[in-house]
Image: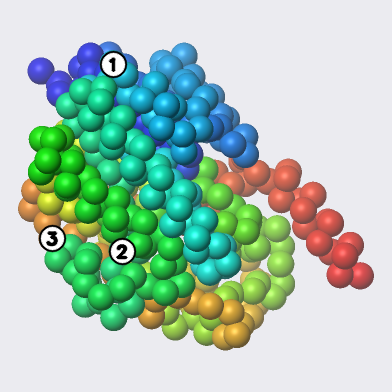
């Protein structure tokens, strides 16, 4: 029997970039899984679920409120806790208190609600941002509480560390079945393109596709990252939730590239001949970030299937299909301001 058949599954933040792909993965695995989405549906995110809206139940809730979390958890068997305040480097540096407070509250309220509602299992989505600046590369899970999180995203990193600790404490004290995953640099369709809180691929792709020349790249381009296509991440999250592993699991790809190499790849994927302009005065974050996914490979059979060049091509195609008209309007506004 399929594990997910007939299961009642709550996905917090399910209308978001990652959450919407996770729900699609759940529906691919079982036509009878009963998915509830708890989300505030901010910034037009309901559109991410338009194609599957008849197959799921949606609840508009502010999960920063404890009663909202309890309402969402009642009657659920599994909770995939993906709701989070996420942002790029600029927002993280400017709002460390907001990043810590909101992510910490989400974790606290959700775990207590799951306990009160008798939820069988909770998957907590953590982050690679829990790791310290000088972590071993590729980074193993055992370094998740070593030193302090990378300073440019300290509020977010500390909140996710504390959420991991709290989840393990609930498992110890109350017997709550918990699973923790640490995703690495997800990208792909439905990402937050060109906004203040965009991550590096979404920010660069928006600049390239609106026709910027030169294309601004924060930092000197020498920092490295490993990027995971969002459909691969969704598969890893659902696998982890199904297996119910108590130890944290890194979910990431084994390709490590510099930001300069990444920017050049985005230009090629978009067919652009624009120049790149690096600005070393802007923050670039952790010097190296690359995933050791040995544990997830051993326990889940997890491995990234979509190589970076292919994922970028897919994301460019999606962007042009869904955001192309908006991008052209933005480009005209920007050029008018520059005259």
Residue 216 rendering spot, x and y as whole percentages = 64, 74
* Mark sitting earlier along the chain (3/1): 1
Front position in the image: 260 or 177: 177
Q: Which is closer to the viewer, label 2 or label 3?
A: 2
Residue 173 visible in the snapshot: yes
Tell me if residue 89 comes above or below residue 170 in the rendering: below
Mark 3 falls on what kind of element?
Answer: helix
> What residue lies at 41% left-to-right and 18% top-to-bottom?
56
Residue 124 rendering spot, x and y as whole percentages = 27, 43
- What residue sits right under mark 3 in the picture? 294
Count neighbours of disc 1 (C-alpha within 10 A) and say few if under 14, some if 14 to 19, many if 20 or more: some
* Mark sitting earlier along the chain (2/3): 2
Front position in the image: 266 or 85: 85
Count neighbours of disc 3 (C-alpha within 10 A) and say few if under 14, some if 14 to 19, many if 20 or more: some
Tell me if residue 256 comes above or below residue 304 in the rendering: below
As measured in the structure, the alpha-carbon distance from the residue carrying label 2 to the one carrying label 1 is 32 Å
> What residue lies at 38% left-to-right and 50% top-to-bottom?
104
Left or right? Give the position of 93 relative to 107: right
Left or right? Give the position of 329 relative to 100: right
Mark 2 falls on what kind of element?
Answer: helix
Mark 1 falls on what kind of element?
Answer: loop
Looking at the rendered image, the quarter that the C terminus falls into is bottom right
Count neighbours of disc 2 (C-alpha within 10 A) and say few if under 14, some if 14 to 19, many if 20 or more: many
Cβ atoms at labels 2 and 1 below 8 Å apart: no
- What residue sits right under mark 1 in the picture? 75
- What residue sits right under mark 2 in the picture? 130
Question: Residue 336 shows which numbered tag?
Answer: none
* Mark sitting earlier along the chain (2/1): 1
Residue 121 rendering spot, x and y as whole percentages = 19, 31
As measured in the structure, the alpha-carbon distance from the residue carrying label 3 to the one carrying label 1 is 35 Å
> What residue lies at 77% left-to-right and 53% top-to-bottom?
330
Front position in the image: 126 or 168: 168
């Amino acid at each position: 029997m399929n594990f997910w058949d007939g299961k009642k599954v709550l996905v917090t933040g399910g209308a978001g970039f990652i959450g919407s792909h996770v729900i699609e993965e759940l529906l691919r695995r079982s036509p009878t899984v009963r998915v509830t989405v708890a989300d505030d549906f901010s910034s037009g995110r309901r559109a991410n679920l338009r194609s599957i809206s008849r197959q799921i139940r949606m609840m508009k809730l502010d999960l920063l409120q404890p009663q909202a979390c309890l309402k969402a958890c009642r009657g659920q068997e599994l909770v995939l806790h993906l709701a989070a305040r996420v942002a790029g480097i600029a927002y993280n540096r400017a709002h460390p208190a907001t990043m810590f407070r909101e992510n910490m509250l989400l974790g606290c309220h959700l775990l207590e609600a799951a306990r009160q509602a008798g939820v069988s299992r909770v998957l907590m989505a953590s982050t690679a941002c829990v790791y310290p600046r000088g972590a071993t590369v590729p980074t193993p899970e055992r370094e998740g509480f070593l030193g302090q999180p990378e300073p440019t995203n300290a509020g977010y990193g500390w909140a996710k560390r504390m959420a991991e600790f709290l989840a393990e404490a609930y498992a110890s004290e109350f017997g709550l079945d918990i699973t923790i995953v640490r995703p690495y640099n997800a990208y792909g369709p439905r990402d937050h393109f060109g906004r203040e809180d965009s991550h590096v691929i979404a920010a660069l792709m928006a600049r390239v596709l609106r026709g910027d020349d030169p294309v601004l790249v924060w930092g000197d381009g020498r920092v490295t990252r490993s990027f995971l296509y969002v459909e691969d991440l969704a598969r890893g999250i659902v696998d982890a939730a199904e297996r119910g592993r108590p130890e944290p699991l890194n979910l990431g790809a084994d390709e490590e590239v510099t930001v300069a190499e990444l920017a050049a790849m985005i230009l090629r994927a978009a067919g652009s001949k624009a120049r790149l302009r690096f600005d070393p005065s802007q923050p670039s974050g952790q010097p190296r970030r690359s995933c050791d996914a040995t544990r997830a490979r051993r326990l889940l059979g997890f491995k990234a299937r979509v190589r970076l060049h292919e994922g970028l091509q897919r994301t460019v195609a999606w962007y042009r299909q869904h955001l192309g008209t908006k991008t052209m309007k933005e480009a005209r506004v920007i050029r008018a301001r520059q005259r």
